[in-house]
Every structure is written in C-alpha cells, then in structure tokens.
C-alpha cells in the first residue's frame, strides 16, 4: 500500500525525499511490478523467475561490521566479522541515502515484518529496496504481519538495499571490492551495495539475530526442526551442506517447523523465518516432492535456465550457477506446522542431532554425546568434503564450521556452546552425533556411503527413545557412547573397530582425524578443561 516516508519514520534514517513509497504490497501486485519493470518472467506454475546479476551467491569477503562502542566488546572479530571504521560507514551510508532521495520517480518498496515466530522474542525488521523482486524475496522469507500489526510499526532493524550503488573508494578504504554489506549494530541498520543477491538480506538478519538473542540468554541456531504428528517430541538437526539436514528433517511422519534458522528460549523453539530458501540444482520431483510442489504462484526462482518459448526449467543446467534457488512461504510445504495453520513454534526439543558426513570412515553411524562433548562438537562443526566435489580435491578434506554456521556468527562460538549446554542440562535433552558418510573405510576406498534407509532407521530409533535401552560402548578415540545394536543394525556397522577390515589402517586414519580436530580447536583459544577433555584423544 502507498504511504509517505514521514508516516513510517523514514525521515529518522535520512530518507526525507523518497518518491513513490509502496509498503507491503500483496504478492499479486509485486508480481505485476516485476513483469512490468522487466525484472523477471513468469515461469512454471506461475512462479516468477529472476536473475540476480553478477552475484549468484553471498559475498562473505565484502561483509563488514562497524567498530562502535555499543557492540565492539561483544563481537567475535576476525575473518567472519571484519571491523570497519565508522567514518567509512558514514560515507557509504550518505551515498545510499542520496541514491534513494535523488532517485527518479521509480518505486521504493518497503517490507515490514518479523524475524522470529515467538511474539516474545521476534525482531521487527524493515527491508527497503528499489527492485520489486527483492521485495518479493523479503515477503517470502520473513514473517508477514497480520492485519493491524503494521499500525505504529517501528523497526528493530532496517536493511537498506541499494544494489545499484558501488563503493568507488574501496581501495582507499582497504576494502575488498566495490560491493559492500555493512552492519551498524548500534544504529540497527545495514546497508547493501553492489550486489543484488537476495540471500544477503536473509542471512544478514540471521547474523543480527545471532548477535541480539544470545546476549539475552536465547540460543540462535543454524538448524532445521520438526515435531511428531501430535505436535510433540520436537527435534532439532544441525549439519553442514551435504550432511542430510534437509533430507532427514523432511519426514512424512513429522511436520516441519523450519528448515534453516531457529531460536531456543525458555518458551521452547521457534522458527526465525516465514519461508524457505531451497537449492533447486538437479531438483527431482520424485526425490524432493515438497520443494517441487512449492514452485507455484508466489514462489521466486533465481538464476535457473529455462526455455524462452515454453518457460520449462532445466534444473540440471549449471551454466549460470550451481546455486540455483527458490524462495517460497513456509505454508507452501504441506507437511509443515505452518502449513497446518499453526505458528512455527514448539516446546523444548526432546532431541538434538548433529549430522556429519565423515568421508574418512572413522565416526560411527550414531553415538551419544555428553553435554561437554556436545559443546566440543558443536564448536567444531565437523564434516568432510569428498574427492571430486570441488576442483583439486583428490582426498577427503576435513571441514569445520563453528556451531554449524560459522559465516553467520557474530559472537564467539563459546557463547553459543555455553547456551546449548545450559539448555541441555536445564531441559534434560540428549544429543546424538549421526554420521551420514562412510563407515568401515574412507570415501577414497571405493566403498559406498552409508545407506539412507539405515540412517533413517537410526534417526527414528533416536526420536522414539528406544535407542536409550540399548547397550553402549565407549569409542576408543572420541570417547562418546556407541550402541552395540540398534533395530537390526549390528556391531559390524555400528562399531568402527568392527566395521574396518584393515585394523591398522583404521587406527592410522583415526589418529589423523583426531589431529585435525585438535588443530582446528586451537583457534578458539578455549581453556575450559571440561570442554578440552571432552575432545578426541590420540
């Protein structure tokens, strides 16, 4: 709907002369504008297709946080959170404001909504953009307000997207490129220039939530979550790309709470988002029917290749990017609690599952972690890339991402680990590590990855609690507890020492992996003996 800048407080952030302000358009009107302004085209089942320009993914080397008094003592400074002098922010902010104030009579789109489904802890977010498709993206990904919630709306954080503005002084300022994504946590404003990619807005707000919530004792998490059909027995799934986080949390027997970002407060767990942002490279309607069915009117496809005449999408075509995506509202997933008309919240999780794809074949298919071990492995955030997945990789490569979401952390990983341990103790929540990779041999041996049906059996035995009645033994190197038998799965699979035919090779490979864990952990400079003693031993 049309409004004036003063009506909604844009003058407070310097936007005093903005033309044609349009706020929270219905999706039908946004789609009309996308097509009218030739930003995109109508595609399969009425979904809109757009290209995001030069950048088809995030630009982590162009992300900065202003070094200012209200936040600088809390932040985890380093390669993820790069310091930027406030004077540089002021200069670029002035350019962004001038761009909006002196633009022609093109539309300025405002999306006002929320991050966080729990009303007690949600953040009021405002997205300001000049492109209709970016407003479409915000409409899909953030929580849309109900009638009346826009009355007197004052944003708790604002993103001003000026993707057509470039930083011409980046070399003088010691920055990486003409592109910039800058957060001023004191002013609760972020500015984006030089990139159209919508994921910067989504993950930008996630980074903001990762700052504000933990300081209030609320754990922010890069994870998926689901419940049983009664809306009970919540479970959360952590895991890096390729570990099966989406596949295993998308279960026909368990409605989805959300697939990517959640918080855990004294009320329980809650989704941060109002939508999903799914990869569609090689999308197969048989293997991922929920995502395929979600591609319809109201969905937004990014950087896909399609036939100009028929508009049929070739999901296997990588000529634009491997990172082809679709965003859609959460209720487009039929088997989600939001799709059932309920808020995307639940009680406290009954189970925590860390997923890893161990290409070395050392970690067991399933193991139970103590709270201290959970802290250690949460901070480590381990998986392994397999030979052939990236150019130049010929052997398995260990990959560590703290808290399974390193690029989006704003505080030191220990802060999030302390919160997960505190909540595990307070609510008596067990934590399991599930290896969806190789068992009994490394990936370079020609052996096959553990089968998905076996992993699903393991997950179901964890979630129904029957795993707790099994006999456990301690892993020689990592110290966690391994069930000897589980739902017909025997020691020859569950126990790495039994799964390996070449025992000497097993010990050699295990010691090598332990060393990688230990070397990685030193960067966090943690001196808590309880956490350090929970790590693997040679």
Image (cartoon, grey):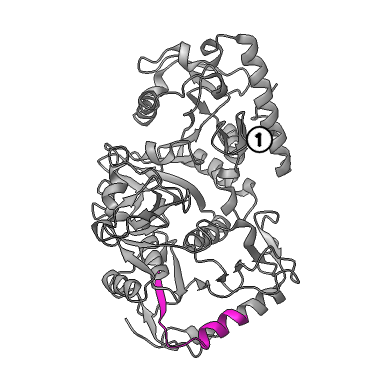
Part of the protein shown in magenta = 94-113
- What residue is shown at x 49% (from left), y 48% (from top)? 222
Please provide percent x and percent y for residue 478: 61, 24
Q: Position of residue 387 (x, y in %)?
A: 57, 31
Q: Is residue 471 magenta?
A: no
Q: Where the C terminus falls, by quadrant?
A: top right
- In the displayed structure, would residue 161 be above or below residue 435? below
* Residue 98 counted in the magenta span: yes
Report x, y in % for residue 350: 40, 37
Q: Quadrant of residue 456?
A: top left
Q: Is residue 100 above or below residue 424?
A: below
421 left or right of 257?
right
Left or right: 77 in relation to 247: right
**In the image, what residue occupies the spot 39% across and 86% down?**
20
Q: Quadrant of residue 487?
A: top left
Taking 210 as reference, is 334 left or right? left
- Residue position for label 1: 531
**Residue located at (52% from left, 87% from top):** 101
Identity of the residue furthest to the front in this view: 309
Q: What element carries label 1?
A: helix
């Amino acid at each position: 709907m049309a409004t004036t800048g003063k009506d909604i407080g844009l003058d407070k952030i310097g936007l005093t002369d903005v033309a044609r302000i349009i706020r929270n358009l219905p999706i039908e009107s946004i789609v009309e504008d996308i097509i009218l302004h030739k930003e995109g085209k109508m595609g399969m089942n009425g979904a809109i297709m757009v290209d995001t320009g030069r950048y088809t993914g995030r630009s982590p080397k162009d992300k900065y946080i202003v070094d200012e008094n209200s936040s600088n003592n809390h932040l985890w400074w380093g390669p993820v959170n790069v310091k930027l002098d406030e004077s540089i922010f002021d200069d670029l902010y002035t350019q962004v404001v001038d761009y909006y104030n002196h633009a022609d009579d093109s539309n300025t789109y405002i999306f006002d909504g929320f991050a966080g489904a729990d009303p007690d802890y949600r953040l009021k977010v405002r997205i300001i953009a000049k492109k209709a498709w970016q407003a479409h993206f915000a409409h899909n990904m953030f929580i849309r307000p109900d009638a009346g919630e826009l009355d007197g709306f004052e944003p708790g954080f604002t993103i001003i997207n000026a993707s057509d503005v470039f930083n011409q002084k980046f070399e003088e300022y010691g920055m990486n490129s003409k592109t910039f994504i800058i957060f001023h946590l004191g002013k609760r404003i972020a500015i984006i220039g030089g990139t159209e990619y919508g994921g910067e807005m989504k993950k930008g707000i996630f980074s903001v939530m990762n700052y504000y919530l933990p300081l209030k004792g609320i754990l922010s998490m890069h994870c998926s979550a689901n419940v049983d059909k009664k809306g009970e027995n919540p479970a959360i799934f952590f895991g890096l790309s390729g570990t099966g986080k989406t596949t295993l949390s998308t279960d026909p027997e368990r409605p989805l709470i959300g697939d990517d970002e959640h918080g855990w407060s004294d009320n329980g767990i809650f989704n941060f988002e109002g939508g999903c942002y799914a990869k569609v490279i090689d999308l197969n309607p048989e293997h991922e029917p929920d995502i395929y069915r979600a591609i319809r009117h109201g969905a937004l496809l990014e950087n896909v290749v399609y036939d100009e005449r028929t508009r049929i999408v070739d999901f296997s075509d990588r000529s634009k990017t491997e990172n082809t995506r679709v965003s859609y509202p959460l209720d487009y997933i039929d088997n989600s609690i939001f799709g059932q008309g309920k808020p995307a919240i639940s009680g406290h999780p009954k189970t925590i599952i860390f997923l890893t794809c161990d290409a070395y074949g050392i970690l067991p298919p399933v193991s139970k972690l103590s709270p201290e071990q959970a802290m250690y492995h949460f901070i480590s955030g381990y998986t392994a890339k397999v030979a052939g997945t990236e150019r130049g990789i010929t052997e398995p490569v260990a990959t560590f991402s703290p808290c399974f979401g390193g690029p989006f952390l704003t505080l030191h990983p220990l802060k999030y680990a302390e919160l997960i341990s505190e909540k595990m103790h307070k609510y008596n929540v067990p934590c399991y590590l599930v290896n969806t990779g190789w068992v009994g041999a490394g990936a370079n041996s020609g052996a096959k990855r553990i089968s998905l049906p076996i992993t699903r059996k393991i997950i179901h035995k964890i979630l129904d609690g029957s795993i707790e009645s099994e006999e456990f033994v301690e892993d020689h190197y990592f110290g966690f507890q391994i069930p000897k038998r589980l739902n017909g799965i025997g020691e020859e699979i569950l126990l790495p020492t039994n799964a390996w035919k070449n025992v000497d090779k097993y010990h050699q490979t295990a010691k090598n992996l332990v060393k990688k864990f230990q070397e990685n952990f030193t960067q966090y400079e943690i001196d808590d003996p309880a956490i350090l003693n929970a790590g693997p031993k040679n």
